[in-house]
Image (cartoon, rainbow, N blue to C red):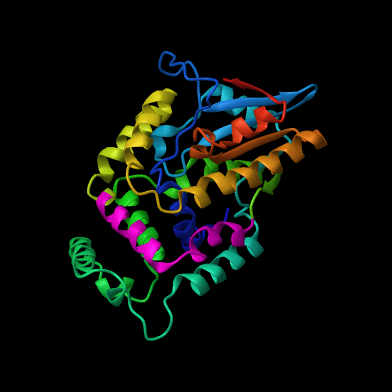
Amino acid sequence: MKKNSLLYLFLSVFIVLGLIACAGSKQDKSDYPCGKKHFLWKVSKGSSSVWVLGSIHMADSSFYPLPAVLDSAFNAAEALVVEMDITDDSVNTQTAKLVVKEGFLPEGSTLQNIVSESTWLRLETLAKKWNVPVETFAVFRPWMVAMQISSIAIQKAGVLPELGVDYVLLDRAATAGKAIIGLETPAEQIQVFSEVSDSLGVIYLEKTLDEVAVVDSMVSDFAEAWKCGNISELQKLLDSETAGEKPYEKRLYNDRNQVMARGIDSLLTQGTKAFVVVGAAHLIKEEDNILKILENKGYAIERY
C-alpha cells in the first residue's frame, strides 16, 4: 500500500485524545485472563453478521502475528471496512489538499500571536529538544500543531502508523483482493477540527503538550493492555488521559460514531460479510458508542 506521510500525520490525530484507542461495551465489563478475549466483537441479527475490531492505530512488530481468532475472522470476510480508505489515491489527494487548506493560518497571522507566551515557550523548548526549528510550527493553526507534535512524540516512543493494526490489515486486504470500504470521507474527518475556533485549538495544543511529557509510559501501558485484551485497564488509562478539558470530544467521538454506526448497519442490512476496523475508542464511550448504537437497533453483540 502506498504510504502518504501527510495523510498519516492527519490520521494520527484520532489517537491523540485517546492516545492509543481502547475498546469495550457497556454490556461487557468483565475481565478475562490475559489473551482469553480480544478487542473483537461479532454484531449479528438473524443470518447477517459482521466482525468489529477495536484497532490500535500505531504499533510495533511485537503486535504480530495477530491472535488466531482475528486472523480467522479477517480471512473469512469478503470486505475490509475502515474509517477511511487510504488505499484510494483520490482519498489521499483530497485529504492532503484539505489538510493544507484548513491547517494553515491566514496570511499575516502566526501561532505565536494566538497562543500565550508560556505556551509558545513550551513549544519552543520541545522543538529545541527534538532539534526541530520552532518556526516549522508557526504558520499552522493550533490543532494542526497539536497533531504534528503528537505524531512526532508517539513515533519517538517506538510505535509507527504503518504498523498499526488497521494499516497492516489494509495491506493484507489489498494483497488478497478484498473489497475495501470507507465509513467516512476526508471532509468529515477534517471538519472535526477545521470548523471550530482557534481558541479551542489552543486548549487542544496545551493538552497535547502536557501529554508529550508522559508519552513513553502511556504508549507502553496502552500497548500492553491491548495485547492482553484488558478492557478495564484500557478504560482506566483512557479516562485518566482525557480527564479535565475535553476539546473536540463530542465531534471526535459521538458525532462520528453515529456516522460509522449507520454505515455498519447498512452493511448488515445488505448482508455484506465484512470485517470492520475502527479506532477502538469508538467502542468504549458510555454514551453513543458504536456497539451501543447497534445494540439499540436490535443487533446482538458478542465479544471474542
Identify the residue shown where x is 41% and y is 43%. 18
Which quadrant of the figure contains the C terminus?
A: top right
Horizontal placement of 4 versus 50: left or right? left
Exactly how many numbered labels are in the figure?
Answer: 0
- The furthest residue to the top: 33
Q: Nearer the viewer, residue 251 or 100?
A: 251
- The furthest residue to the bottom: 108
Residue 249 forms part of the magenta stretch: no
Q: Position of residue 197 (x, y in %)?
A: 44, 67
Q: Position of residue 165 (x, y in %)?
A: 50, 39
Q: Nearer the viewer, residue 297 or 24?
A: 297
Residue 204 forms part of the magenta stretch: yes
Identify the residue shown where x is 60% and y is 55%. 86
Horizontal placement of 92 versus 221: left or right? right
Tell me the chief SS of the magenta region.
helix
Q: For the magenta stretch, what is the residue range?
A: 185-210
Identify the residue shown where x is 46% and y is 48%. 249
Report whether residue 176 is seen.
Answer: no
Horizontal placement of 111 versus 291: left or right? left
Q: Quadrant of residue 295?
A: top right
Q: Quadrant of residue 163?
A: top left
Q: Nearer the viewer, residue 204 or 7?
A: 204
Q: Position of residue 133 (x, y in %)?
A: 25, 72
Q: Nearer the viewer, residue 227 or 139?
A: 139
Identify the residue shown where x is 53% and y is 27%. 25
Report whether residue 87 is seen.
Answer: yes
Q: Position of residue 248 (x, y in %)?
A: 45, 53
